[in-house]
Amino acid sequence: IYNFREVSIDESTNGTTSVAYPNPFQSYVNIMIPQHYGLTQLLILDELGNEVTVKKDLRGGELYIIGNELSPGLYLFVLESDQYREQL
């Protein structure tokens, strides 16, 4: 059995792309949203592509999602703004 824990963000992105860690997650997930994305929303989709929840009016920075807000399963995070759409 291996236990991996991400303790830092890859510095090579220089804040130009979003990052979600740790992956996989159980108790929490951090999502880093670049400042230049502007006003952003986060869609959380299940493995079938069904919308589970939407978090609106987000700005660049760190978003912390507690794992017990979601049922166990696979999820796709989609960040959307006027100029960007990124899947995590």
Image (cartoon, rainbow, N blue to C red):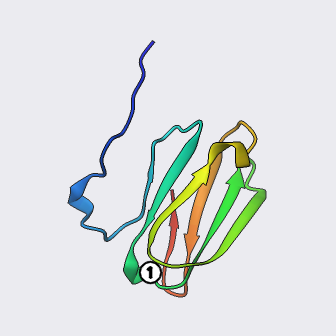
Does 18 appear above or below 41?
above
Q: Residue furthest top?
A: 1
Residue 7 at x, y percent in the picture: 33, 41
Q: Is residue 47 left or right of residue 15?
A: right
Q: Look at 42% across and 22% down and name the residue there.
A: 3
Q: Is residue 36 left or right of residue 84?
A: left
Q: Residue 73 is drawn in which quadrant?
A: top right
* Picture residue at 75% right of the left edge, 49% below the top: 48
Q: Which residue is mark 1?
A: 37
Exactly how many numbered labels are in the figure?
A: 1
Q: In the displayed structure, does residue 72 sit left or right of residue 24?
A: right
Quarter that holds the N terminus: top left
- Asked where in the image residue 53 lies, by quadrant, the reply is bottom right
From this view, report whether residue 44 is shown above or below residue 60. above
Report crowding for label 1: few under 14, some 14 to 19, many 20 or more residues within 10 A (C-alpha).
many
Residue furthest left in the image: 12
| Residue 74, x across and y down, in percent | 66, 41
Q: Position of residue 19 (x, y in %)?
A: 41, 57
Q: Which residue is at a point 66% across and 65% down the rendered structure image?
A: 43
